[in-house]
Image (cartoon, rainbow, N blue to C red):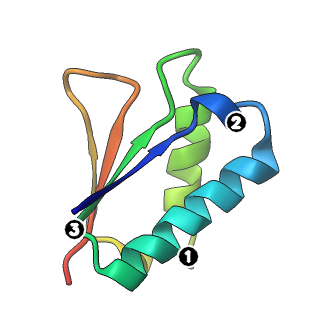
Amino acid sequence: MKLKLDLHDIYNHGDEIERALKRVFDEAVAKKAPMIEIIPGKGSGQLKKHVLRFLERKDIKPLYHRVEKDSKNFGRLFVHFRW
């Protein structure tokens, strides 16, 4: 089971982005999902940087195993978990 979060619709709402990321992480932990696919889109790269900063937070970083940047699609990240 893979969870997916597409941020295209809320790209310019900073607080909503944080809530969506937190919500998908909470769901992944509750369901012990092996992976989350996060789609910040290509754009200017600012949204992707926002997501990467979120992933580096001290309360989030211990929750996942690793982050993989899609080599074929710049606008997509995979967050892998090890349960």
**How many C-alpha atoms fall within 10 Å of the one at disc 1: few (<14), some, or many (≥20)?**
few
Identify the residue at horizontal 55%, vertical 76% (top origin).
Answer: 58
On the image, which quarter does residue 47 sit in?
Answer: top right
Residue that numbered label 2 is attached to: 10
On the image, which quarter does residue 23 sit in?
Answer: bottom right
- The residue type indicated by label 3 comes to Pro
Image check: 56 left or right of 44? left
**How many C-alpha atoms fall within 10 Å of the one at disc 2: few (<14), some, or many (≥20)?**
some
Residue that numbered label 3 is attached to: 34
Q: Quadrant of the N terminus?
A: bottom left
- The residue type indicated by label 1 comes to Lys
Image check: 39 left or right of 31? right
**Between residues 66 and 39, which one lies in front from this camera angle?**
39
Residue that numbered label 1 is attached to: 58
Helix, strand or loop at disc 3?
loop
Residue 28: % across, % down: 39, 72
Query: Which is more N-terminal, label 3 or label 1?
Result: 3
Would you say the residues marked 2 and 1 are in contact, meaning their CB atoms lie under 8 Å apart? no
Residue 60: % across, % down: 51, 73
